[in-house]
Image (spheres, helix red, strand yellow):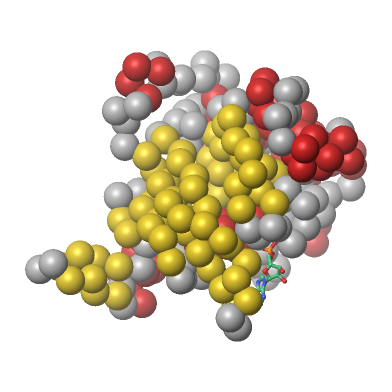
Amino acid sequence: MRAVSRRRVEPALESSADPIVMARGVRKSFDRAEVLHGIDFTVRSGEVSCIIGASGSGKSTFLRCINGLERIDGGELVVAGSHVGYTLREGRLHEWNPREMARFRQRIGMVFQQFNLFGHMTAAENVSCAAVKVRRMSKAAAAARTAKLLDEVGLSSHAGKYPHQLSGGQQQRVAIARALAMDPELLLFDEPTSALDPELVDEVLSVMKSLAATGMTMVVVTHEIGFAREVADTVVYLDDGLVVEWGPPQQLITNPTHARTQAFLSKVL
Ligand code: ADP
Ligand code: MG
């Protein structure tokens, strides 16, 4: 793994840097039942934002909106310079066609709770297939990049193994390497350690920490409050489809001001 010191954005520059994710009043309904009631959320380049909140509060739905897997019903959502799902042309909003959506998604990496590796491919094939198919890299270039990525997640010696031959923690590290193979501008994590046996959680969190240290922009839905405290620039507490409280971890985790944040933290800490 690389040991690179964290590239932190100076506060003075921070306010002028373009956000990678900018959500204003984002609303989302399923069958007329609104589950996101107007989310405001910002992540700037190089920042790590952790989203915490009870089950059913809308965390996964919001992540899925960020990478275009769900379409928002109201508000504004700008990700990596694009209004997700739309292009403004000649003063009118045009909905993306599937190709435009696919191109957008290639720029956003996502890591899921259940790893979602291809079971019939080795670790190396899982990592390289996106680079070969989507980035149109030569096989040799993809192989070199795959070797480097597997080394970064500490799995060089497991390149030829299939998912069923790997532990959950190793599978999740392959999934992270696969997401990185696309050179994403933003990495989304949806409870990446929730499906793991407790003794395997740290190896995944430590890979995520080194990734944060390289300056990768990350949005992490997690119940790992220790990770949020240590790594996040901003922590967001989501409750019933609304951001109740946000701030640096020293404030939100150590000193939450809202009764609902306090009640949630007292349950998970
Ligand atoms: P979290 O990730 O915080 O546990 P979710 O975003 O998964 O919460 O879910 C928020 C709410 O939206 C829940 O009430 C859930 O049942 C509902 N929901 C999520 N996805 C769908 C869907 N595809 N269709 C209908 N309801 C959904
Ligand atoms: Mg979820």
Looking at this view, name the residue that lies furthest to the bottom.
31
Side of 193 where 18 appears, left or right: left
Give residue 215's position: percent from left, percent from top.
47, 29
**Viewer-proximal residue, 76 or 3?**
76
**Viewer-proximal residue, 8 or 21?**
21
* Image point (67%, 20%), residue name: 250
Give residue 157's position: percent from left, percent from top.
70, 41
* Image point (52%, 53%), residue name: 39
Side of 125 where 140 appears, left or right: left
* Image point (49%, 48%), residue name: 40
| Quarter of the rendering occupied by the C terminus | top right
Using the rendered view, name the quadrant where residue 161 is placed: bottom right
**Viewer-proximal residue, 118 or 244?**
244
Give residue 57's position: percent from left, percent from top.
70, 58
| Quarter of the rendering occupied by the N terminus | top right
**Viewer-proximal residue, 156 or 91?**
91
Give residue 252's position: percent from left, percent from top.
68, 29
The total of numbered circles placed on residues is: 0
Looking at this view, name the residue that lies furthest to the left.
90
Query: Against 51, is 15 above or below?
Result: above
Is residue 122 in view from this perspective? Answer: no
Query: Against 17, is 123 above or below?
Result: below
* Image point (63%, 58%), residue name: 241
Is residue 52 in view from this perspective? Answer: yes
Using the rendered view, name the quadrant where residue 97 is placed: bottom left
